Image: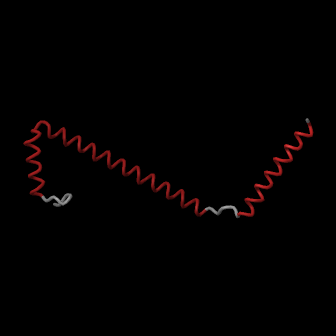
Amino acid sequence: MNVFGIGLPEMALIMVIALLVFGPKKLPEIGRSMGKAIRGFQDASKEFEAEFKREAEEIEQAVKTPALPESKEVATHEAATAESNNHAATSSQQS
C-alpha cells in the first residue's frame, strides 16, 4: 500500500504520533473533519469538471453552426439602417 509515497510503516508511525498528540477523544473528530474537507474538495472538482465539459460542448456547437457570410451580414445591416432612415424621414415629414 503506497499512499502519496508513504508506505504502511510510515502511515502507522504517523497514526501513532497523531494518537499521542491529539488523544483518543479528539482523533475521531479530526478524522471526520478531514473526511468532510476531502468530500468538499471532490464535489468542487466534479462541479468544475461538469462546468468545463458544458462550456466545451457550447463552444463545439458554436463552431459547428455555420455563421452568416460577411456579405449577408453587411446586406442585413444596410437594410436595417435604410429602414431606420426611412422611419426617421417619415416621422420628420409628418411633423
Of residue 75 and residue 63, the one placed in the foreground of this image is: 75
Quadrant for residue 25, please give it.
Answer: top left
Indicate the quadrant containing the N terminus: top left, top right, bottom left or bottom right.
Answer: bottom left
Q: How many marks?
A: 0
Indicate the quadrant containing the C terminus: top left, top right, bottom left or bottom right.
Answer: top right
Which residue is found at the position 14% from the left and 40% from the top? Answer: 27
Where residue 67 appears, as percent x and y from the top left, is 66, 62
Whether residue 75 sits left or right of residue 64 in the image: it is right
Which residue is found at the position 48% from the left and 54% from the top? Answer: 54
Which residue is found at the position 13% from the left and 59% from the top? Answer: 7
Where residue 60 appears, as percent x and y from the top left, is 54, 61
Whether residue 35 sits left or right of residue 58 in the image: it is left
Quick check: 88 above or below 61? above
Where residue 48 appears, as percent x and y from the top left, is 41, 51
Q: Tell me, what colour scheme is on the image?
A: secondary structure
Quick check: 47 above or below 91? below
Quadrant for residue 22, please give it.
Answer: top left
Which residue is found at the position 84% from the left and 47% from the top? Answer: 85
